Amino acid sequence: MFNIVIFGPPGSGKGTQSEKMIAQYGFAHISTGDLLRYEISHHTHLGAIAKSYIDKGELVPDDLIIDMIDMKLEKMRNIPGVIFDGFPRTADQAAALKEMLKGHGEKVDLVINLNVDRQELITRLLKRGETSGRSDDNLETIEKRLKVYEDQTSPVLAFYQKEKNLLDIKGMGEIDEIFNTICNAIDSARQ
């Protein structure tokens, strides 16, 4: 199985590029937000534990998230690869993901970091806010979200830099050009 972690600030095109990778390669998409919602809505044991933290306004502990991902991966043994989106968010989570994957004889093969100029991100997100009606796509909230992303992600990117599997990709320009760059990196790493 080929495992990819995709990073990029809000508005960088992670969702668009993930969809294209899924269509091109048949990869599965693992979003921790989706996993949490699924476990909670299906009243699973892990979902009940996660809900108890969420109801108190606390973050769901890393080990619980890792357990959810682990269970999901157990059900996905016959797929060509996985795209991890929204996880890991901390260096500790990156280390935990590494250990969990190692238990499956797997590893994170490629970390794609979509780089987009800050002003371009703001422009994209403001435009998205106009069309989507999302209340969190206003200038003040966008600035906060970008700052939180930068603060949280730097240590994770440093972790993967040390692992030597981090690829910075310019996330500006034509969507298909960006995707071709990603495909070339995937194809090269899979050989």
Image (cartoon, rainbow, N blue to C red):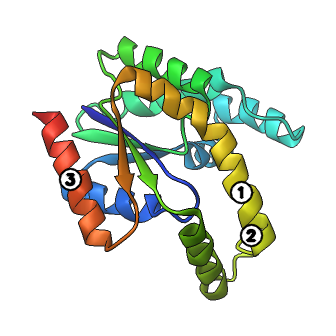
The image shows residue 126 at horizontal and vertical percentages of 65, 79
Q: Position of residue 185 (x, y in %)?
A: 21, 45
Comparing 29 with 108, the one in front is: 108
Q: Are marks 3 and 1 in contact (CB under 8 Å)?
A: no
Quarter of the figure that contains the N terminus: top left
Q: Quick one: label 3 or label 1, which is nearer the N terminus?
A: 1
Decide: is 55 above or below 104.
Answer: below
Q: Residue at x 80, y 68 (%)?
A: 140
Q: Which mark is residue 185?
A: none
Amino acid type at mark 2: Asp
Q: Mark 2 sits on what residue?
A: 136
Name above or below for residue 139 compared with residue 67: below
Q: Which residue is mark 3?
A: 183
Residue 169 as seen in the image, left or right of residue 188: right
Q: Amino acid at mark 1?
A: Arg
Residue at the image point whose x is 63% and y is 42% from the top: 36
Tell me what residue is drawn at x 74 percent, y 62 percent.
143
Q: Residue at x 81, y 33 (%)?
A: 53
Residue 145, label in figure: 1
The reply to whether residue 130 is visible in this rendering is: yes
Picture quadrant where residue 181 is located: bottom left
Q: Taking 60 as reference, is 57 left or right? A: right
